Image: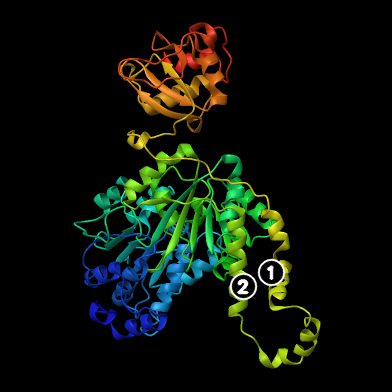
Amino acid sequence: MKSFETLGLSRGLVESVQLIGFETPTPIQEKAIPVLLNGNRDFVGLAQTGTGKTAAFGLPLLELVDDKSRDTQALVLAPTRELGLQIANDLENFSEKFKSFNIVAVYGGSSISEQIRKVKKGAQIIVATPGRLIDLIDRKAINLKTIKYIVLDEADEMLNMGFKDDLDKILSFTPEDKATWLFSATMPREVRAIMKNYMSDPFELTVGEQNTGNVNIEHQYVIVQERDRYLALKRILDNNPEIFGLIFCRTRIDTQKTAEMLMKDGYSADALHGDLTQQQRDRVMLSFRQRSLQILVATDVAARGIDVEDITHVIHLNIPDEMEFYTHRSGRTARAGKKGVSIAMISKRELGKVKQIEKTLKSPFKRAMIPTGAEVCQKQLLAFMHKVNEVKVNEDQIAEFLPAIEAELKNLTKQELIKRFASLEFNRFFDYYRNAPDLNVEGKRGGSEGPEERYSGGARFFINLGKMDGLDVSKMIELIDDYAGLGKNDIGKIDLKGAYSFFEVEPEKADLILKNMNGIEFKGRQVRVEITEQKESGGSRGRSSGGRGGRSSGRNSGGGNRSRSDQKRKWR
């Protein structure tokens, strides 16, 4: 295995890295540093978050930049303030035993005049978020014509956050002969476009298979009813007493609500989302980095760029729709070669999403069961007893109190003492979980629908539309949504045939289908929907006759959430 000494770095840089505690380079560092030290070629590095990309570009950058010149020679662009500050701090630490650089971080939410002052003092290296850098360019407060090296860190993140126009503008102000280094966890077509437009014959390096997950992350999923989602979250937290983790929610409202509920229930938690002021964000992040907080509840955008050591768990309260979001979420744990756990909380009908992510990441997902109340109590009690066993006793300070303590407890046996000690700490905890119900939902993966796999077992319908009508699974879901007002989470297994199809919905939603879809027109064709209890076999459609599934059962009901004219406008 190579060492940092063998990569071509100066002695001062190697000493600084060793002082930080880095012993051997990670794969991305081992392969990228020798290439980047040449300084004369564009570079693309594809590697998962947490694999040491900052040192991979930071060490060569420090080697190449002239500390005697006051010109700005290197620009590092990062998607978020937190990541930018982390990069600037790392660069300063890397150079501690090497050279004296003026490294300036510029970002929104802080005094722009103070940042301008620092830049004008002669910043050899600037670490910036795109938005604030545009402000400095517009104010003519920064000169990018002297740039020799530009680093686009977390390029996919920047594009996901809508910074494409800003990147185009920034790059237009830099010299054509600069070296551009691009690092990304994923390689969507937008990143490829940046490579095509702004890079010349780049050296491309992929560490691990493209779009695969970090092998040190254990991916799990739990199946839960929507109404039990928060209760299940608390079970997961309680079952991991030493957790130091991130919980991801879809929206700012859900993030704030979840954090407030956790705090009310006694957890060490807080929220991070876009509605917070910069001062509030700084306070929350400082508390999390210092481990004053055990749980950080965040939105995808707010958490981008978070680089906090030793995060043990990432919990997805809602599984994201975009593959890239899951990759970046889960990448907050298992950093720098350590182990971590990513837990997705899903409904039974979201099993297809799990299979999609599993296939793309090439990493297996393991179904985990939501712990029972008894299991949680046992885990908490044993964790507490472990702390008791490991506690450091200050013999000198406690000695004078021991006679009185022993006198008070002299009538208790060892067994009684253990029982009372445990009960004193856990009576309230035991009371909460004494009659706790099982929150697990039955669910299994199966079928052959590939990316469109959906749950099975609801009320089953026949519909006289199929592939010949130009329908696929997504269009069938859209059709049902438009007329019956059901979202994709209400719709189960869909079996598309040529001239007809079958689909399933939650049993309590069956009446909405019958009332609102019978007799509608689809591309000039009258639609017939009937409930069926028999799975299709061979050429048989398996329909029931009569009953509430008959043709006339819902024709005269034009109810639903949308007007008939609105419905027909879309599907005629």
Horizontal side of 466 relative to 351 (left or right) equals left
Residue 142 in the image, given as x and y percentages of width and height = 42, 64
**Kind of residue sitting beneath label 1:** Ala
Residue 189 in the image, given as x and y percentages of width and height = 30, 45
Farthest residue toward the left? 201
For the point 35% across and 66% down, the residue is 53
- Crowd around label 1: few <14 · some 14–19 · many ≥20 (10 Å): some
For the point 39% across and 13% down, the residue is 464
For mark 1, what is the residue? 422
**Kind of residue sitting beneath label 2:** Met
Q: Is residue 138 among the parts visible in the rendering? A: no
* 187 vs 552: above or below: below
Looking at the figure, which quarter contains the C terminus?
top left
Chosen colour scheme: rainbow
* 389 vs 453: above or below: below
Q: Nearer the viewer, residue 82 or 47?
A: 47
Tell me whether the residue at label 1 lies in contact with that at label 2, contact meaning CB atoms closer than 8 angstroms: yes
Residue 472 in the image, given as x and y percentages of width and height = 35, 25
Residue 37 in the image, given as x and y percentages of width and height = 24, 73
For the point 27% across and 61% down, the residue is 207
C-alpha distance separating marks 1 and 2: 8 Å
Horizontal side of 373 relative to 354 (left or right) equals right
Looking at the figure, which quarter contains the N terminus?
bottom left
Horizontal side of 216 relative to 458 (left or right) equals left
For mark 2, what is the residue? 385
* 203 vs 478: above or below: below
Q: Nearer the viewer, residue 82 or 325?
A: 325
Label whose residue precedes the other's in the sequence (1 or 2): 2
Circle 1 SS class: helix
Q: Is residue 23 among the parts visible in the rendering? A: yes
